[in-house]
């Protein structure tokens, strides 16, 4: 499992794992558009259930332009993750440069009502040299 996910961060018993892949078939390099897909696995190693409330992304392109993306849940869901459980989802990121990066955090509500900001690890977005 750990080989599948290239990046990981753990905060208060919540582990966020990420793998990212460049998608040439979704990119339009000649038009200055590159596209990546990323797979996130959120694991709950804490002793109580947690619910993912919001996402907070910092997306930086190859020119250093930063875009902040915030919203409720992930891909339209606010999953509850039981102790020992996990939640997976896949999403994508377009950029106008062949490289950049993403990082951020999720806000979770624990069963006891407390909130946890769990780090999403920094991960690079890099198109192969053959793609641009």
Image (tube, rainbow, N blue to C red):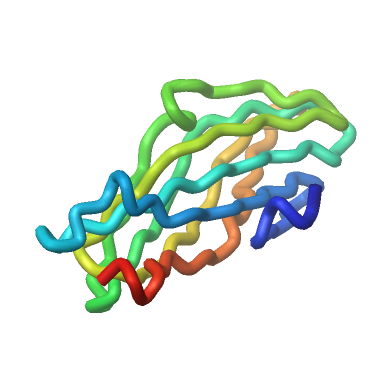
Q: Which is more toward the observer, 62 or 119?
A: 62
| Residue at the extreme front | 130
Q: Residue at x 50, y 21 (%)?
A: 77
Question: In this rendering, would 51 be left or right of 71?
Answer: right
Q: Which is more toward the observer, 9 or 30?
A: 30
Image location of residue 104, percent across then percent down: 49, 56
Q: Is residue 71 above or below residue 60?
A: above
Q: Is residue 48 visible?
A: no
Q: Quadrant of the C terminus?
A: bottom left
Q: Residue at x 56, y 33 (%)?
A: 89
Image location of residue 69, percent across then percent down: 33, 48
Q: Which is more toward the observer, 93 or 58?
A: 93
Q: Residue at x 44, y 28 (%)?
A: 75
Image location of residue 19, percent across then percent down: 59, 53
Q: Is residue 65 above or below residue 33?
A: below
Q: Is residue 107 visible?
A: yes
Q: Is residue 50 above or below residue 130?
A: above
Q: Is residue 34 above or below residue 99?
A: above
Q: Residue at x 52, y 65 (%)?
A: 123
Q: How many marks?
A: 0
Which image quarter: residue 52? top right
Image location of residue 125, percent across then percent down: 42, 65
Question: In this rendering, would 11 be left or right of 126?
Answer: right
């Amino acid at each position: 499992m750990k080989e599948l996910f290239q990046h990981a961060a753990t905060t208060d018993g919540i582990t966020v794992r990420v793998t990212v892949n460049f998608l040439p078939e979704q990119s339009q390099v000649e038009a200055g558009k590159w596209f990546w897909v990323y797979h996130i696995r959120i694991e709950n190693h804490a002793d109580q259930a947690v619910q993912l409330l919001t996402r907070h992304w910092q997306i930086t392109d190859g020119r250093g332009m930063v875009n902040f993306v915030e919203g409720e849940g992930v891909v339209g869901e606010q999953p509850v993750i039981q102790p020992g459980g996990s939640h997976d989802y896949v999403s994508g990121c377009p950029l106008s440069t062949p490289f950049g990066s993403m990082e951020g955090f999720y806000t979770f509500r624990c069963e006891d009502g407390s909130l946890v900001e769990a780090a999403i690890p920094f991960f690079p977005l890099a198109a192969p040299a053959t793609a641009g």
